[in-house]
Amino acid sequence: MSVSFGSDSSQHKTKSTVEHMVRCKVGRSTSLLVLLHVSVSFPEPDCAQELDIPSLCTSISERIRFLGGLAVEALEERLSLVEAVRGTSSSIYDGNGRNTYQVVVRLAHASPLAVEALRAACASMMQGVLLAEKKGSKTSGTHGAQSVPVAVRVLKLTADK
């Protein structure tokens, strides 16, 4: 039994239409600045360690790529760190030694798929890496790294100018 799905010319026409749609969709993507709220549960209330924000951004980028699958927009999506500010939260929900970070990252090709993958990647983040703070030294290696629980939320998306 043989099944035919159309002639070669109709398949070629469909293929070129799909390629055109993909090119148009990719061409419309814009750059976004994304404000992330990161809550960290430090092992001690007065912990002198810092969260490794660049490592966290890399982990989120890898999850975006994984969640985006093989879609054209998600192949090389990377978050670039713009700014990170640490502040101790005074909220009743962030007590018991939790600290917060406000992190601004740039999502270079913010297609609808990339934005949804970003939201899902942030929601799935559960671990972050702390680096030992060494006074008088600007180097920090992963030999003193410790994994801690984190929660990441997307607070705001703003078009990058």
Image: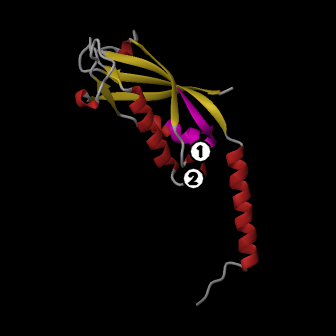
Please state the horizontal and vertical placement of residue 44, each as a whole percent of the image: 23, 16
Q: Are marks 2 and 1 in contact (CB under 8 Å)?
A: yes
Q: Read off the residue under disc 1.
A: 113
Q: In this rendered view, identify the residue nearer to me: 53 or 97.
A: 53
Please state the horizontal and vertical placement of residue 119, each as a whole percent of the image: 51, 36
**131 is higher (above) or lower (below) than 22:** above
On residue 149, which mark appears? Answer: none
Task: Please report whichever mark, 2 or 1, sits nearer to the chain's N-terminal start.
Answer: 2
Tell me the SS state at disc 2.
loop
Q: In this rendered view, identify the residue nearer to me: 97 or 133.
A: 133
Is-magenta flag for residue 117? yes
Is-magenta flag for residue 138? no
Q: In this rendered view, identify the residue nearer to me: 95 or 99.
A: 99
Label 2 crowd (10 A; few <14 / some 14-19 / many >=20): few
Please state the horizontal and vertical placement of residue 102, each as a whole percent of the image: 47, 19
Q: Read off the residue under disc 2.
A: 71
**Quadrant in which the C terminus is drawn:** top right
- Within the image, what quadrant is residue 9 found in? bottom right
**22 is higher (above) or lower (below) than 79:** below
Q: Is residue 113 left or right of residue 84?
A: right
Q: Is residue 81 left or right of residue 28?
A: left
Residue in the image at 71% along x and 45% along y: 27
Please state the horizontal and vertical placement of residue 49, each as a whole percent of the image: 29, 18
Tell me the SS state at disc 1.
helix
Label 1 crowd (10 A; few <14 / some 14-19 / many >=20): some
Which region of the structure is painted magenta? 105-119
Residue extending farthest to the top is 90
**Total marks in image:** 2
